[in-house]
Image (cartoon, rainbow, N blue to C red):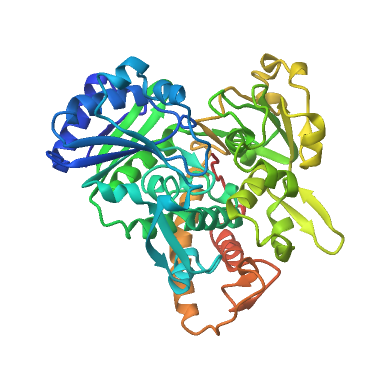
Amino acid sequence: MIGLGHLDRLLSEEEVGDILARGLALAGLSDKRVLVVIPDSTRSGPMPLLFQLLFDLLGTEVTALDYLIALGTHPLMSKNAIERHLGITPEERVCKYASIRIFQHRWDVPDTFRTVGVISRGEMEVLTGGLLVDDVPVMLNRLIFDYDHILICSPVFPHEVVGFSGGHKYLVIGIAGADIINFTHWLGALVTSMRTIGIRDTPVRAVIERAAQFVDRPTTGCSFVVRDSGLAGLYIGPVRETWEAAAALSARLHIIYVERPLKRALSIAPPMYNDLWTGAKAMYKVEPVIDDGGEVIVYAPHITEVSYTHGELIDQIGYHVRDYFVKQWDHFRHLPGSVLAHSTHLKGAGTFDAERGIEYPRIKVTLATSIPEERCRRINLGYRDPKTINPEEWANREDEGVLLVRRAARCSIGHGSRSSGREPVRTIQTVSHQVLERLLEKLNTTRKEARPAHPLLESRVFGKRSRARPATSYLRLILARLFRCPLTVTIPLD
């Protein structure tokens, strides 16, 4: 792997070019057909610089240099939006870059896909710790098989579903079919955002890495870490290795700690998020730092739509805590897991009393967008007229329990600080999970096979259903007492 990262400065263009040149030379791409998988405009990064450098380095060395925008289930980008994203003019696209073809992933077109493998129930039980179990086909965009080499060019940030974005996520979710997308997103929702975001090794990441093993094309990772308007780190080489290096740097740069829980936060979603589906990150990034009974206001006057892709479904189900769906699973099992996941991620943690039909969110989520008040109420979210909010009135009020997040796109905020000892507690928790996985593996060799009404309700310790708490909660309780540390530790969010 070739790479460089800094905590205190950005890489110069010369350094970026040198890293790319050396890394691509090791990949041996001469006379190869190369497909570059890149993010869409909802992800931060200096794509114009990278696009230009890749053209300069590979344009005359390879027999094809094309791009595939990993949309996942995001809407298609317009021709002008693509050109802005890559920093090229219409004239340059048809002249200087005429040899480059730019494709967009069409998740909604069945002919897009080829099934590359199936992760079996048995293997999925191991990967997810029994939390969500099914036979899941892995379908990827068949375009990748028209090329000799795949270059995954991905930013790495804390992420609410997978822990840290980037790497093989750009294959297994970014250019994948509905089955694996829905499975991974609902799995992440069962774990919850607060126990996922900013954690490197998660159940969803384990599923992604396993699914990526089905790809039989040589693949190189170009993982980068964005800070302000430039790159703090860039790594090229084996996909997993570059992603791990970038995630380590991202954890230092993109996770901000505060000393105590806050009452309210005004989280500003930047213009690159054009609907609530993507703008909801303004909530994910601050949820862990808000005290019970507090409030997050998602401030985005430019957002007028809940989701350009999934809006009708969200209007039907609204936004709810995880257990609202889990405890009424027969009513919701037919819906896409990614839609259910988005719903519960934005609503946040909480409980649901199934007997009384009452939902108890941990915090209040309010929209200060251009989505009408009636619709906000109907989908079970609060409303505030954005015209009544002056963001500057929220600034520098942390001592009052009030937080202003000016650009909720890159940084995540967690309760605690490295200097206060929160980091060692988090390390203990991570090590504990590794130890407990070995204990569970031994326990599972003697457990009786039993399938619960919903995988979330199965106790992995006692080998039977338990509505009290899943096994990981028992294990966390034991470890908390052993290490005399709090049950709710610092979990950074994205």
Q: Quadrant of residue 26?
A: top left
**Quarter of the image where one finds residue 471:** bottom right
Quadrant placement of the N terminus = top left
Query: Is residue 224 in view from this perspective?
Result: yes
Which residue extends farthest right? 356
In the displayed structure, 241 sits above or below 458; it is above
| 195 or 478, nearer to the observer | 195
Q: Position of residue 335 (x, y in %)?
A: 65, 56
Q: Nearer the viewer, residue 312 or 258?
A: 312
The reply to whether residue 362 is in sight is no
Please determine whether, in this image, residue 450 is positioned above or below residue 253: below
Q: Is residue 443 above or below residue 264?
A: below
Question: Could you tell me which residue is drawn at 47 percent across and 73 percent down?
Answer: 439
Instruction: Tally the numbered discs.
Output: 0
Residue closest to the eye, 321 or 429? 321
Q: Is residue 448 left or right of residue 227?
A: right
Quarter of the image for the C terminus: give it. top right
For residue 47, side relative to residue 448 (left or right): left
Residue plotted at (60% across, 34% down): 259
Where does the image place residue 216, in percent across and percent down from the top left?
26, 57
Q: Position of residue 330 (x, y in %)?
A: 71, 66
Q: Is residue 111 above or below residue 125?
A: above
Kindly identify the residue that appears in the image at 71 percent across and 25 percent down.
370
Q: Is residue 440 left or right of residue 399?
A: left
